[in-house]
């Protein structure tokens, strides 16, 4: 019998996904669990397997189209089924599973929501589903965060999703349509109204130009970076650290480490280990801000930024404070490798409490990284270079590195950030932990 293929929910807070590539075309034979299409969300890129064996009868959502989770994106005719049995195509954003065919997906779908209240036309031809008094407007955490940043009441926004759900597209369209004339709605008594940002000036170029649409991942990165800059009070402190003992330890142990464990000994686990030790002493670096509260995270889950051809992804090493040096090295190698081949699960890119990024691998001396929300700090590692330094009133050549900590000045004072960095400096310059 026909089987509906739906957009899976890749994580609790993910409300929509973008079909980036179809791996099969209409009429192709497909086996159960064979990769069928690729999607991109604000958390992870993934290949989605076919939920059933049969023939791909219909593709309802085109490449580069974004739809809500549980939207039917394709129909597979099962063994001996007729293509005509598939449900008719519907607009991608409003597509719902038909009553007849069996519904299957790579991720178990939640129960079908109750019928939405009657809708009324909204400006611009949108279908609005106004909530009744006291009814909570359905929206994702991302939508609510954007609403808080712009002092917008989500209840004012017409929702086009299932059951009147307000999607990211809805709130962005609302903000674009309202413009500077929109009256800001205070979210709480302690939040100040934000002045609307001035429109970006239109650039005029004399020569030929080429306009290229952002990839879904690039759009998500752009949005997250802009939201982070608007959310946190970014301040960066830079420390210069001597790496003599770490370099000596690595050079002495690299060959035996690889022979025993089957992986190369890089510098990343050293920086990772030092950061974890500092977090133990300064737990506010492992916290987040929720309204007027500081939430201290008991788990130390450190994300490691991995550069991809299409952008950046941050897999997370959970409970990093419970791992020894070898455990950290293995976790970094494993997650980075699977990130580059798009084999991460959504759980492996969620739940981070602190982030480590290493632009030094590309030759950068130091940078001012942007905080990965809702975290409050990120550590950037520069390139290790030999430099002339003063030691005991004499010029000496030492391997040196710049570490840059960007922190949220709303809750972290400069003195605390510098003490945190001082602890990292002490661990690295006095390294004595065996790695074998």
Image (cartoon, grey):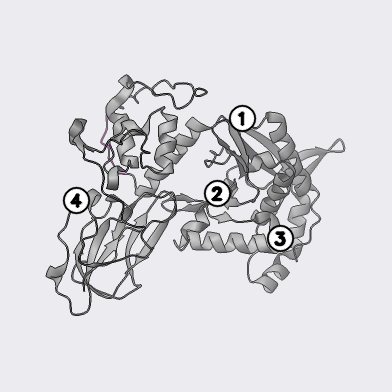
Mark 1 or mark 3: which comes first in sequence? 3
Q: Nearer the viewer, residue 142 or 185?
A: 185
Q: Main secondary structure of the magenta part?
A: loop
SS assignment at label 1 = loop
Q: Nearer the viewer, mark 2 or mark 3?
A: 3
SS assignment at label 3 = helix
Q: Write down the residue under mark 4.
A: 91
Quote the CA–CA distance across marks 4 and 2.
45 Å
Mark 3 or mark 4: which comes first in sequence? 4
Q: Is residue 394 above or below residue 307?
A: above
Quote the CA–CA distance across marks 2 and 3.
24 Å
Which segment is the magenta one? 203-213
Q: Write down the residue under mark 2.
A: 362
Determine whether, in the image, residue 204 is placed left or right of residue 278. Answer: left
SS assignment at label 4 = loop
Q: Write down the residue under mark 1.
A: 409
Q: Is residue 266 magenta?
A: no
Q: Write down the residue under mark 3.
A: 325
Q: Nearer the viewer, residue 366 or 86?
A: 86
Residue located 71% across and 33% down the image: 416
Q: Residue 218: which quarter of the image?
A: top left
């Amino acid at each position: 019998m026909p089987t509906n293929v739906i957009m899976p929910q890749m994580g609790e807070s993910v409300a929509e996904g973008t079909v980036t590539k179809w791996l099969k075309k209409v009429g192709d034979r497909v086996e159960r669990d064979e990769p069928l299409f690729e999607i991109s969300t604000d958390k992870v890129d993934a290949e989605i397997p076919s939920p059933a064996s049969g023939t791909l009868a219909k593709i309802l959502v085109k490449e580069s189209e974004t739809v809500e989770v549980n939207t039917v994106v394709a129909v597979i005719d099962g063994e001996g089924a007729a293509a005509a049995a598939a449900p008719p195509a519907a607009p991608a954003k409003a597509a719902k599973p038909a009553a007849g065919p069996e519904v299957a997906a790579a991720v178990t779908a939640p129960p079908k929501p109750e019928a939405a209240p009657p809708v009324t036309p909204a400006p611009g031809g949108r279908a609005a589903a106004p909530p009744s008094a006291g009814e909570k407007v359905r929206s994702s955490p991302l939508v609510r965060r954007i609403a808080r940043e712009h002092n917008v009441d989500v209840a004012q926004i017409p929702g086009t999703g299932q059951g009147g759900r307000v999607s990211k597209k809805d709130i962005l369209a609302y903000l674009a349509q309202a413009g500077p004339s929109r009256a800001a709605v205070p979210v709480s008594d302690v939040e100040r109204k934000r002045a609307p940002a001035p429109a970006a000036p239109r650039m005029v170029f004399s020569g030929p130009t080429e306009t290229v649409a952002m990839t879904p991942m690039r759009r998500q990165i752009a949005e997250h970076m802009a939201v982070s800059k608007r959310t946190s009070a970014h301040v960066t402190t830079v420390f210069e650290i001597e790496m003599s003992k770490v370099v000596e330890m690595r050079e002495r142990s690299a060959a035996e480490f690889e022979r025993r464990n089957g992986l190369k000994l890089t510098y990343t686990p050293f920086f990772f280990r030092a950061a974890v030790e500092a977090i133990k002493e300064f737990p506010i670096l492992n916290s987040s801000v929720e309204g007027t509260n500081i939430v201290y995270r008991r788990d130390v889950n450190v994300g490691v930024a991995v550069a991809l051809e299409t952008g950046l992804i941050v897999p997370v090493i959970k409970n990093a404070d419970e791992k020894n040096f070898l455990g950290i090295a293995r976790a970094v190698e494993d997650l980075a490798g699977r990130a580059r081949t798009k084999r991460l699960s959504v759980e492996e890119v969620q739940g981070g409490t602190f982030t480590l990024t290493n632009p030094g691998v590309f030759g950068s001396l130091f940078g001012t990284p942007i905080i990965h929300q809702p975290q409050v700090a990120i550590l950037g590692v520069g390139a290790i270079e030999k430099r002339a330094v003063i030691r005991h009133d004499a010029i000496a050549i030492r391997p040196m590195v710049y570490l840059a900590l960007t922190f949220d000045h709303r809750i972290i004072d400069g003195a605390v950030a510098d003490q945190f960095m001082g602890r990292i400096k002490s661990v690295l310059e006095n390294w004595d932990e065996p790695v074998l």
